[in-house]
Amino acid sequence: MSLWEIENRCFSAGHALVCGVDEAGAGPLAGDVYAAAVILPPGLELPYLNDSKRVTPKRRDALYGQIREQAAAWAVASVTAAEIDGMNILNARMLAMERAIQALNPQADYALIDGNRDHGTRYRITLAHETVVKGDGKSASIAAASILAKVSRDRYMEELAKTYPQYAFEQHKGYGTKLHYERLKEFGPCPAHRRTFLKKWEAAEAARGADNEQNRLGPLG
């Protein structure tokens, strides 16, 4: 399947400015969730353009620059960890994507949204659109958006690591790796952590602490 097949269908239907939209960072325990919206010139060919997860970091960085230089329009937006805690991750994803779409200049007249969701309970995609399951491997515009969102978030996490070096955010980018949980156990959460994502872990740690205390006191403690 050509990466331009879906966009070409949209052009044939009368849409002139079609943007691809994708997000990065829905699953991590810490940091913002990012989204990007990209309008590419029709037929633009970018070597190695694909789903950001299928592109090496070096090529992602190269594509990041090429997309920003050659796109007809692009925008990156984010929703903070505190905002995520206040609305849940689905609403946060929708809000980040909506923010990116609204920031485009010129504005798109149609959007291709990666995945199968276009709304939460509080936020939704308001521009005329369609969802595309695994769209970052099927649409040039969505693939470009996935690159911008992924690289932007990774760079943000690397900067966040300078503020909170004890968590090694530059290594795991906030995901729930063994190293991250080890650092959480040692230092506790920081303001960049999504506290709603840590509820089960914190409950398990509290229960483990209670068990350890009971074992220390013995059966008559």
Image (spheres, helix red, strand yellow):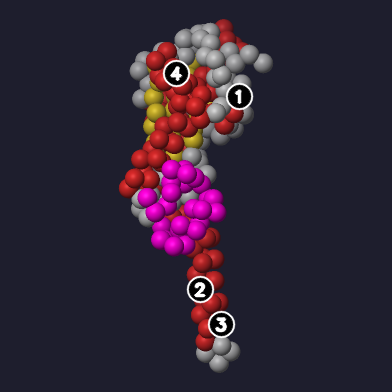
Q: Is residue 154 part of the magenta span, yes or no?
A: no
Judging by the rendered image, the residue that carries numbered circle 2 is 209
Horizontal side of 85 relative to 212 (left or right) equals left
Which is more toward the observer, 126 or 29? Answer: 29
Chief SS of the magenta region: helix
Between disc 1 and disc 3, the foreground one is: 3
Q: Which class describes the residues within 10 Å of circle 3: few (<14), some (14-19), or many (20+)?
A: few
Please determine whether, in this image, residue 3 is positioned above or below residue 95.
Answer: above
What range is drawn magenta here? Answer: 165-189
Q: Earlier in the sequence, mark 1 or mark 2?
A: 1
Q: Is residue 180 part of the magenta span, yes or no?
A: yes
User: Distance between the Cα atoms at labels 1 and 3?
Assistant: 53 Å
Q: Earlier in the sequence, mark 3 or mark 4?
A: 4
- Using the image, tell me which numbered label, if any, was put on residue 137: 1
Q: Which class describes the residues within 10 Å of circle 1: few (<14), some (14-19), or many (20+)?
A: many
Q: Earlier in the sequence, mark 1 or mark 3?
A: 1
